Image (cartoon, rainbow, N blue to C red):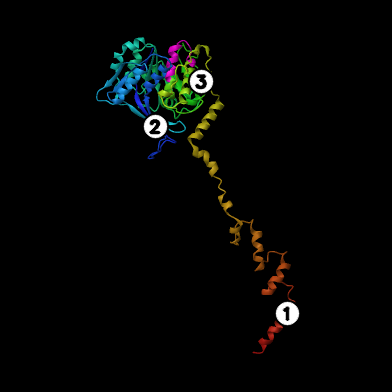
Amino acid sequence: DLCVHLFRMLADLSYLNELPKTGEILQAMYREQCFGGKGANQCMAAAKLGANCALIGKLGNDMLGNIYYEYLQQMGINTDYVEQLEGMETGIAQINIDENSTCTIVELPNANLMLNSKDVSNAKRFFNKAKVLVCQVETNHKTLICAFKKFRGVSILNVTMPPIRTELPPELIQAPRILCTNAQGAAALTDRAEVATVQDAKEAAQALIEKGAQSVIITMGPLGAVHVAQSKHEQCQGEVTHCPAAPVRYLADTSGAGDAFVGALAYHILRFPKLCRESHIHAANICAAYAVGHRGTQPSFPGPEIAVDDLCMIQPNFYVIPDETPEEAEQRKQKEAEAANPKTAATPETAPTPVPTIATTPETKAEPSGGASPAPEPEQKSAPERNSASPVAATPEPEQKSAPERNSATPVAATPAPEPAATPPRESAPVAAPA
C-alpha cells in the first residue's frame, strides 16, 4: 500500500540540560541508541498505524547494517529492495536534546547517498501496486524526479531544513502531488528570513503555489499546519487553510514529531482517499502530538490505538486564513522591523541618563562651596556665616554682630562707632611716649 524512499540510519540520542555552545563540553544525563533516518521513520510511523509498507534504500554491509536489516523484517517492513553495499558503512546521526526538547541533529549519510535512478526502475513492481509514495529531499534529486514521473498515485515530498542542498530545481517542486515542509524549509524555499506566524506561512505557501507546486503543507510545530492546493478536486481550492495543533499532555522529545506527522498523513490518505486534505492533516496532528510526548524517534510513534479510524465521522478542525487588512499588514511590518532592529527600539531607553543627578548627594555638595547647582545654596550659607560676614544677607545682621565683634572689627557697620572711639585713646598713649 505504501512505498517509501529510504534515507535510513541509526540515531544516537543524548539528553542534556542545555545544548553546548561553541567549544563547550557538557555532560549528558541520559543516552540511547535507536533506529532512525527520515525515510525509515516515516515508513515506520505509517506501519505502526496499520499500513503495509515497503522500503527502497541502501545499507552498509557492516554490523549496524545487519542489525537494522533484521529489525525492519521483524517490524513487517518489505525489504525486497533494500540492498547492503560492500565496503560502505550504514548511515548514522547524532542527536542532542535539551530539557526544553530543543534538538540539534548531525547526519552522516554514508550508504544512503548511493541510491540512484536505476534502483527506482528496478522497483517497478512496487510502483505499480503502491497508492502512496513518500520521498525525502536528502535523496539525489535526479532519483526523486525519476520516481515521481514513474508513480501514478499520491506522491509526497518531505522537505526539512536546513537540507544538504537548499536550492531545489523547479521540476522537483512541481513533480510531487504534495510538497510537505516545515517553517524553516518554507522560509528557505521562498527566500524569506523566517516563517514565524500563520500569516507568514500563508504567504510562503502561496509563493510555492506560484512556483508550480500542486499543493503545499507547512508544519508550524505548536501552531499546527497550513495547507493550500490548486487542484480542482480539493475542497478548499485556492484557499489557504489553517489546522491548529492537537493538545500535548507532556513535552518530552520533538525529534520525531515531523516524521510522525508525515507517516500519519500518508496512512490516513491511504485509508481515507476521498476525504478532504484538512481531515488528513487533522489526524496527522493528533499523531504528532502523541510523538512529542514520548522519547526517541521510532519508539515515540503511536500504534493503531491512536490511528483515527473513524476519521470520516469527525469534523476536521480548520479554518480559512483571512486576508490581512492594510492596518494589520502595517502593524505586522512594524513588529517585524522592531524585531529585526532591536537596537533602534532600545535607543529611547538609553537616551535619558539621570545617573549624574542621582550620584550627587548633599555630602558631596557641602565640600565645594562654589557648587553650580542653585538648590543647595541655602545649606551652604549657614556654615560660612559663623566664620565670615556676608554683606548680602540683611536679615541675619543682628545675629552676626555679636560673633564678629569678638574676633575682628568690621568697618562696614555704623552702629559700633562709639566703641572704637573709646579704644583708640588707650592705644594712642603708648604710641605717643616713644615719639
Query: In percent of the image, x 50 and y 32: which residue is there?
Result: 336
Q: Secondary structure at mark 3?
A: strand
Q: Is residue 137 left or right of residue 376?
A: left
Observer-nearest of 35 and 58: 35
Q: Give SS at disc 2.
A: strand
Asked if 313 appears above or below 205 in the picture, the reply is: above
In terms of secondary structure, where does tag 1 sit?
Answer: helix
Between tags 2 and 3, which lies in front? 2
Mark 3, Cα crowd under 10 Å, few <14 / some 14-19 / many 20+, is many
Residue 274: percent from left, percent from top: 46, 10
Q: Is residue 389 magenta?
A: no
Residue drawn 71% across and 81% down?
Answer: 423
Q: Nearer the viewer, residue 275 or 296?
A: 296
Tell me which corner region of the image, top left, top right, bottom left or bottom right, holds residue 410: bottom right
Residue beneath disc 1: 421
Q: Which residue is mark 3?
A: 242
- Residue identifier under label 2: 31
- The alpha-carbon separation of the residues under discs 1 and 2 comes to 108 Å
Using the image, determine if residue 219 lies above or below residue 425.
above
The image's mark for residue 279 is none
Q: Callout 1: 10 Å neighbours few (<14), some, many (20+)?
A: few
Q: Amino acid at mark 2?
A: Arg
